[in-house]
Image (cartoon, helix red, strand yellow):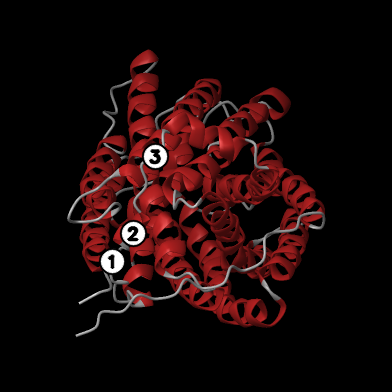
């Protein structure tokens, strides 16, 4: 029996069982983010100005619902735990909305097309936020030591990269050649159905495998909790700096297919090779970066990765063909890999300090508050795409302007370079809390 008044520490969840969940959560949302511009703007003819407006609206809505979802998760009490019910419910809802998102009737145009895009884009992002708020909150809870946390995080980032190979690099091949063409939408619907089914199976498996700690449930009220987070200066420093990285990669993921088509003058299916080398280098680099974290710490490694990522976008700007683009993409992969290995560890340290200071484990709310900065992705990518119409005349696939190649070189290289340079400089001035002492385990005795 356990000691009176205490609950036994649950058995440690194997790192791979937790990490595989990232595979399931990454496939749907990255297909959406990686193909939404190509699908709606270039194929269906949605005007970039309408796209930009929708992105701003959905980002604002998502910024508001994220803290609420995280707070509800923190306060959930059930025999299945705090996070698992949300994961099991959210997975099929996201899959269904993704399929609907890529099933827009080709007859839609004007306001009807904008409305379809807006409704399902917002729903997809909402259910993705539900999943990631709960999935991300499990990392610091299941693995309190930074060394164990770094291993679990690297494994899950590895699974994410495998998902990216499928949802980004393979998707253009499936949608435009295997199941459809570059001018049709059928391939997107079939691919979405396949990806949705895979995601549901993987997420549910992971959720049922996670062993949550019942001691971590909280009953804090929403507004006081939010107010204490907002007053935390480290929250703003880490959040805004991390947003520079997040927005930069969102621009890359959203525009790479059109960069290949217009800037490199190649069929969209060639995005497979560029995305593939970026992801391959990122996956291989996780092993190296995890060892660097163990020797030099997460903060030092985070700063170095930021600088490498910024330099890589400058190299990508000067690429003129697939070979030079792939060479620059390898450098992008190296910097991105370092950010994948460290960014969540930096955030987790902030969560650790908050739990130690307030005596409450409110990882769901805190991560959702950090998600506010992630919502900037939608606003900035929308504004960035809209700027191509203002400065370069690219308004849609039907009205690409006189030089869409340079327009998407700016979108994919210049904007991310500026953002990551700002982030690399800001990271030099950030300090994070020290790793907390591990909690004593309460073991069952007979």
Which of the pair 284/351 is nearer the observer?
351
| Comes first in the chain, label 3 or label 2 | 3
| Comes first in the chain, label 2 or label 1 | 1
Instruction: Please identify the quarter of the rendering in which residue 407 is found.
Output: top right
- Expressed as whole percent of the image width and height from the top left, the position of residue 290 reads 59, 78
- Does the CB distance between marks 2 and 1 fall below 8 Å? yes
Which of the pair 50/162 is nearer the observer?
162
Which of the pair 415/81 is nearer the observer?
81
Can see residue 183? no
- Expressed as whole percent of the image width and height from the top left, the position of residue 249 reads 60, 51
Badge 2: residue crowd in 10 Å (few <14, some 14–19, many ≥20): few
- Expressed as whole percent of the image width and height from the top left, the position of residue 373 reads 58, 40
Dot 3: what SS?
A: helix
Distance from disc 3 to disc 1, alpha carbons, whole Å, reads 23 Å
- Does the CB distance between marks 3 and 2 fall below 8 Å? no
| Comes first in the chain, label 3 or label 1 | 1
Dot 1: what SS?
A: loop
Q: Is residue 406 above or below residue 106?
A: below
- Expressed as whole percent of the image width and height from the top left, the position of residue 89 reads 21, 46
Which quadrant is the N terminus positioned in?
Answer: bottom left
Query: What residue is pinned by disc 2?
Result: 215
Badge 3: residue crowd in 10 Å (few <14, some 14–19, many ≥20): many
Q: Is residue 134 above or below residue 380?
A: below
Query: What residue is pinned by disc 3?
Result: 71
Query: What residue is pinned by disc 1?
Result: 7
Q: Viewed as shown, does residue 341 lie left or right of 434? A: left
């Amino acid at each position: 029996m356990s000691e009176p008044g205490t609950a036994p520490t649950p058995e440690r969840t194997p790192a791979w069982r937790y990490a595989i969940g990232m595979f399931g959560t990454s496939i749907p949302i990255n297909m959406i983010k990686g193909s939404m511009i190509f699908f709606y703007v270039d194929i269906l003819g949605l005007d970039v100005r309408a796209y930009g407006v929708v992105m701003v609206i959905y980002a604002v809505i998502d910024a508001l619902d994220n803290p609420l979802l995280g707070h509800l998760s923190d306060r959930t009490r059930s025999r299945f735990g705090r996070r698992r019910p949300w994961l099991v419910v959210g997975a099929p809802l996201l899959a269904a909305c993704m399929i609907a998102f890529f099933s827009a009737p080709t007859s839609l145009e004007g306001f009807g097309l904008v409305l379809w895009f807006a409704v399902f884009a917002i729903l997809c992002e909402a259910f993705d936020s539900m999943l990631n708020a709960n999935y991300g909150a499990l990392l610091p809870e299941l693995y309190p030591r930074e060394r164990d946390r770094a291993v679990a995080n690297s494994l899950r980032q590895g699974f994410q990269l495998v998902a990216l190979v499928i949802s980004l690099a393979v998707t253009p091949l499936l949608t435009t050649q295997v199941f459809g063409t570059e001018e049709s939408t059928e391939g997107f619907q079939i691919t979405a159905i396949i990806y949705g089914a895979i995601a549901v199976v993987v997420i549910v498996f992971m959720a049922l495998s996670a062993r949550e700690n019942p001691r971590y449930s909280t009953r804090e009220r929403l507004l006081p909790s939010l107010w204490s987070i907002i007053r935390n200066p480290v929250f703003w420093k880490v959040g805004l700096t991390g947003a520079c990285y997040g927005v930069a990669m969102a621009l890359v993921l959203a525009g790479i297919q059109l960069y290949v088509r217009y800037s490199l003058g190649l069929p969209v299916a060639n995005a497979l090779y560029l995305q593939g080398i970026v992801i391959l280098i990122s996956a291989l680099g996780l092993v190296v970066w995890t060892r660097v974290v163990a020797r030099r710490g997460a903060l030092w490694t985070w700063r170095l990765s930021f600088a490498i990522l910024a330099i890589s976008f400058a190299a990508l700007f000067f690429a003129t063909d697939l070979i030079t683009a792939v060479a620059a993409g390898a450098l992008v992969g190296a910097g991105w890999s370092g950010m994948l290995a460290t960014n969540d560890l930096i955030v987790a340290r902030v969560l650790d300090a908050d739990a130690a200071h307030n005596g409450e484990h409110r990882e769901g709310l805190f991560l959702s508050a950090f998600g506010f900065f992630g919502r900037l992705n939608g606003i900035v990518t929308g504004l960035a795409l809209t700027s191509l119409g203002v400065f370069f005349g690219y308004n849609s696939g039907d009205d690409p302007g006189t030089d869409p190649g340079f327009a998407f070189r700016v979108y994919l290289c210049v904007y991310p370079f500026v953002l990551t340079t700002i982030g690399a400089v800001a990271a030099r001035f950030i300090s994070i809390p020290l790793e907390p002492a591990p909690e004593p385990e309460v073991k069952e005795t007979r």
